[in-house]
């Protein structure tokens, strides 16, 4: 029996910004249909790692593979098309457009990108799909509101709906609960758990407690390097991890 | 009131054509009305890039000028019929847009504006120096649309009213085209790019390609405006390529309301009427237009049509 093909693999990935090495020869693999998290103290290189995984910038060296296929250097827009979607750490929505239009335009990507003449009013199924996604993240009542008028937590939820619009096999989320109230955090974590039942989800998080309870696999980074990998229990009892986190206080 | 405005917005092409059909009756003379038609279309083309996609080009005079010159050269030097010449003008402007756009979209913000300005200046000097074709400083003269008889109707382009309605036919077709593009799936993509490039790319849209396509469409529309202007004036002054006209496109859009369908046309009308009135009093008409422009930027940043829409929407 052959082992399952990982949803995403990184092999010896480094990222340098000038002299600064943000990520140093990290190798890791993520199994499909799992909820995994990348954790580490501040400055561990989590966001850099996320940006490499999600295509915001290519690695300085090393390879990135999606379902066994080498995708190193694929442009950003290519990621959504092959099935990798993301939500940003700093909320990125189309501010002046309504919540519904935000999601509708994200849904549209699969159907139409350069059609100049077809009226989009005739593509009702896109609007329906957008409403279904808004329903899923609990925003359907606010569909007509400009995204800029939504509360912070709602904008984050809107981003999740937009990421889902691409029908991704892999959903990447950079600190999805950053800046959220405790109540909003609970709602978001429930949503993430539910989403992970249908696809692979990788979170970047620095609040270790938050992910311990729900994730199946954890990858720990420290100073841009691989530190540990394993189940929450293994990580909890890993001496290197303890040292890094306890050392931080 | 809101119902009326909604109806106008729903049938925006029909509304603007209906208005333009009676427009010459409202204007003191036809030449001004034709100018507003031509520059209204120029501003609409510019607004596609500026208002809807969020890219501030300072080089759009290049496309107006290339449209004018190539139409003129085709008629004067090559002796082509005016319809073919018009098409050649539009295609040439689109090609110029492809070239300038290809180079400019690599930059952002102020650098984008500067690159478009610099490239447009190169176009200016190229046409200025190609005296044999363009007449250089004196401009290109001798563009004549011959009189003809079509289905028993006398068609005389020298008659201002005929000229107005012929040009209107082209402007109307172009407005219909722009309206279709804005209502298309692609129209949604360009607004998404304006709102947030990063997110648009993460959604799977190729931002560079989208920008380039809008740039070319915008250049083609502005080229058509230029081609029509050549027929209207019978000459192509070298000023057609001057960066002052690029600046006027920005002013017209802001006066009327950028990112709205009617705004640029209203802005063009306001700007040219103001210019027309102010020049009868003083040669320093720019000072008056400039003052009005500043009042708008400071107090009505959404422009005439934009502010009007906001007001209507606030009162249910």
Image (cartoon, coloured by chain):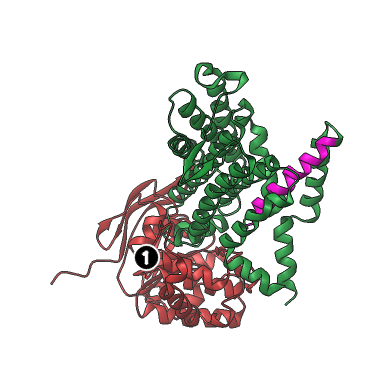
Quarter in which the N terminus of chain A is drawn: bottom left
Residue B6 in percent (x, y) is at: 64, 71
- Residues B161 and A86: in front is B161
**Residue at image point 51% right, 67% down:** A245
The answer to whether residue B261 is seen in the rendering is: no
Residue B116, by quadrant, is: top right
Quarter in which the C terminus of chain A is drawn: bottom right
Residue B152 in percent (x, y) is at: 48, 45
Start-end of magenta stretch: B261-280
* Chain represented in green: B
Chain ID at mark 1 = A
The answer to whether residue B119 is seen in the rendering is: yes
Residue A213, by quadrant, is: bottom left
Magenta-span inclusion, residue B268: yes
Give the crowd class for mark 1: few <14, some 14-19, many >=20 residues within 10 Å.
few
Magenta-span inclusion, residue B66: no
Residue A240 in percent (x, y) is at: 43, 65
- Residues B126 and A7: in front is B126
Disc count in the image? Answer: 1
In the rendered structure, the colour chosen for chain A is red
**Local secondary structure at mark 1:** loop
- Residues B228 and B64: in front is B228
Residue A76 in percent (x, y) is at: 41, 54
Taken as a whole, is the magenta stretch helix, strand or loop? Answer: helix
Residue with the mark numbered 1: A111
């Amino acid at each position: 029996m052959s082992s399952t093909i990982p949803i995403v693999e990184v092999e010896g990935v480094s990222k340098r910004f000038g002299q600064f090495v943000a990520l140093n020869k990290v190798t890791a693999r993520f199994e499909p249909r799992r909820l995994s998290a990348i954790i580490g103290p501040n400055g561990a290189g989590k966001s850099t790692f996320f940006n490499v995984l999600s295509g915001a910038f290519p690695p300085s060296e090393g390879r990135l593979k999606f379902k066994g296929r080498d995708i190193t250097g694929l442009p950003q827009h290519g990621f959504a098309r092959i099935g990798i979607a993301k939500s940003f750490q700093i909320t990125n929505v189309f501010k002046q457009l309504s919540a519904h239009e935000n999601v509708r335009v994200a849904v549209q990507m699969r159907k139409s990108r350069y059609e100049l003449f077809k009226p989009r009013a005739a593509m009702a199924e896109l609007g329906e799909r957008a409403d279904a996604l808004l329903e899923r993240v609990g925003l359907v009542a606010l569909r007509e509101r400009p995204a800029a008028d939504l509360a912070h937590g709602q904008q984050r939820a809107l981003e999740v709906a937009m990421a889902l619009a691409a029908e991704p096999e892999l959903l990447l989320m950079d600190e999805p609960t950053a800046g959220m109230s405790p109540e909003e955090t609970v709602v978001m974590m429930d949503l993430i758990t539910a989403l992970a039942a249908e696809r692979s989800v990788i979170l970047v998080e620095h609040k270790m407690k938050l992910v311990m309870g729900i994730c199946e696999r954890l990858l720990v980074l420290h100073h841009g390097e691989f530190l540990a990998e394993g189940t929450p229990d293994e990580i909890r009892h890993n001496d290197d991890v303890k040292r890094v986190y306890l050392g931080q206080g | 009131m809101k119902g009326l405005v909604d109806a106008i917005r729903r049938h925006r092409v029909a509304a603007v054509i209906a208005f333009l059909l009676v427009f010459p009756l409202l204007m003191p003379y036809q030449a001004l009305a034709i100018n507003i038609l031509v520059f209204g279309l120029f501003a609409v083309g510019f607004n596609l890039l500026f208002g809807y996609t969020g890219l501030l080009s300072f080089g759009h005079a290049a496309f107006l000028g290339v449209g004018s010159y190539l139409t003129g050269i085709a008629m004067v030097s090559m002796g082509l019929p005016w319809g073919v010449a018009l098409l050649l003008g539009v295609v040439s402007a689109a090609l110029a847009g492809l070239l300038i756009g290809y180079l400019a979209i690599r930059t952002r913000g102020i650098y984008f504006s500067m690159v478009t300005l610099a490239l447009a200046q190169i176009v200016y000097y190229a046409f200025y120096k190609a005296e044999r074709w363009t007449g250089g400083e004196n401009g290109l003269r001798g563009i004549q649309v011959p009189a003809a008889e079509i289905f028993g109707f006398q068609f005389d382009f020298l008659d201002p009213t005929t000229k107005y309605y012929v040009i209107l036919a082209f402007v109307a077709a172009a407005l219909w085209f722009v309206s279709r593009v804005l209502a298309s799936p692609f129209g949604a993509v360009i607004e998404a790019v304006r709102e947030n490039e990063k997110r648009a790319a993460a959604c799977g849209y190729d931002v560079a390609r989208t920008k380039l396509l809008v740039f070319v469409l915008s250049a083609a529309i502005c080229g058509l405006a230029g081609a029509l202007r050549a027929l209207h004036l019978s000459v192509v002054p070298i000023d057609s390529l001057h960066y002052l006209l690029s600046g006027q496109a920005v002013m017209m859009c802001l006066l009327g309301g950028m990112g709205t369908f009617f705004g640029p046309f209203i802005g063009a009308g306001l700007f040219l009427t103001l210019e027309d009135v102010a020049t009868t009093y003083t040669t320093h008409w720019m000072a008056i237009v400039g003052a009005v422009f500043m009042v708008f930027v400071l107090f009505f940043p959404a422009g005439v049509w934009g502010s009007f829409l906001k007001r209507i929407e606030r009162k249910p």
